[in-house]
Amino acid sequence: MAHWRIKLSLLLNYFVFAILLNSVGTVILQVQNNYGVSESSASVLEAFKDLSIAIVSFIVASYITRIGYKRAMLFALGLVTVACLLMPQVPAFWTTKLLFAAAGAGFALIKVSVFATIGLITNDSNEHAGFMNFLESFFMVGVLSGYFLFSAFVDNTNLQSTNWLSVYYVLAAIALIAFVLLLSTPINERSVRHEDTKNVIDDLGDMLRLAVTPVVLVFIATAFVYVLMEQGIMSWLPTFNSKILKLPTSLSIEMASILAASTAIGRFLAGLLLGRISWYWLLMICLVVSGGLVLLALPLAATVDGRAVTGWSDAPPAAFVFPLIGLFIAPIYPAINSAILSSLELRQQGPMAGLIVIFSALGGTTGSIITGNVFEAYGGQTAFYFSLIPIGLLLVLITVFSRMQKKTGHEVKPVSGMAGH
């Protein structure tokens, strides 16, 4: 098999970053237990992750070909290896912030480099699409694995125990294996080296000119509101399970995996349905059902009587019902991203991708901080009821976005295989 070593390295890269980036909800719960951090203070972890992704993605977009894909990936892997080793050695809230800043910056380098490297190691469009889909699927495997990996290191009998930090030795080992594998594997980058002559100022100008067009402004608002809702739920679900549903800490983390699994299934099913139904009507139906699930699940959470829960079999119904929202919100982000990108000229797609990354990161940070503050001030149920507000806004924004596309003659059918953020 040609290029098997580099392909394996790319898969390991994505795997370790999938676990790190999607562990925010788990770590938010644990820093409250270990370091006495409040909900509002813990919510800033999302900002350290998302803002570093946005800033580094924007900066390296112009210079990645000069740095080199392999060097960029090696730096990213080395950075997170050191950050992971630091976590159990210096157990403190500031090292947790540092870890997510390193993970965000590293992922920005990895994502840009991995996507570009795929073009160097595949022979045709079919092989490229096949490996890209496999890579995105492996990312979801990492997301799901992370919940169970972290829960295996949690001590339910002593919530103040820092034994869970030992999980970072495992993650450091995976990152180190990927580093050594990549270091020992030659990659021919001569065909792309120094081709990009644009600088940061040029990129910023392209983005600003694109951003002020009305249809893009509406799209940016739509993407921002969606990620605000999604990350608010995803980052605070383990805490909701623990503090509202009274689940043991390890089970609270494990059962949050239902959201990740339902999101993955939702995107797969949407890919099948988009060939048969208008993307606009699919998203409208999904949003209405999502709102219904919120109104169904949260009253169920209010009936939890506090009796001891020992496993999945005796967990309250709300722990299963609410995470199913992922099944219905999952198609929204890939569909709107694909709709806007495929309606633009090729030269505009780079700046548009930059806008997507930046405003998705800002939305994720805002959603986590708002949810954390509402959780602290009014309780978890109220915080999750607030998800009805972005659901209502999305119904309006997506309708406006769809109509504007029709008026400008750019209405397109989204690419079903488009990956999420």
Image (spheres, grey):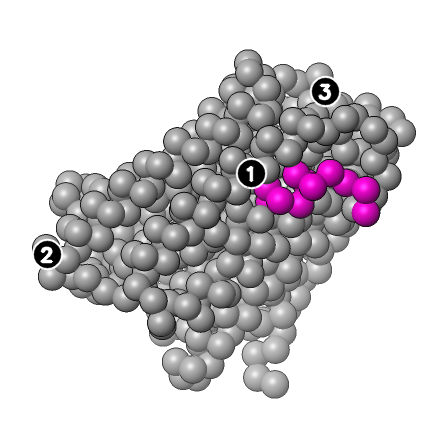
Q: Measure the alpha-carbon separation of dots 3 and 2.
A: 53 Å
Q: Residue at x 23, y 65 (%)?
A: 412
Q: Residue at x 11, y 61 (%)?
A: 409
Q: Nearer the viewer, residue 44 or 271?
A: 271
Which numbered dot is residue 296? 1
N-terminal label among 2 and 1: 1
> Tag 3's secondary structure?
helix
N-terminal label among 3 and 1: 3
Q: Amino acid at mark 3?
A: Tyr
Q: Is residue 50 above or below residue 139?
A: above
Q: Is residue 293 above or below residue 369?
A: below
**In the rendered image, which residue does mark 2 sit on?**
408
Q: Amino acid at mark 1?
A: Leu
Residue 380 visible from this viewpoint: yes
Residue 317 lies in the magenta-colored region: yes
| Mark 3: few/some/many CA within 10 Å (<14, 14-19, 20+) | some
Whole-percent x, y for residue 122 in the image:
46, 79
Q: Which residues are magenta?
A: 313-323
Q: Measure the alpha-carbon separation of dots 3 and 1.
A: 34 Å
Which numbered dot is residue 360? none
- Most common SS among magenta residues: helix
> Tag 2's secondary structure?
helix
Q: Amino acid at mark 2?
A: Thr
Residue 293 relative to residue 67: left or right? right
Give residue 407's quadrant in the image. Answer: bottom left
Q: Residue furthest right?
A: 157
Which numbered dot is residue 35? 3
Q: Nearer the viewer, residue 252 or 105?
A: 252
> Tag 1's secondary structure?
helix
Residue 139 visible from this viewpoint: no
Q: Is residue 409 above or below residue 329?
A: below
Q: Is residue 405 above or below residue 100?
A: below
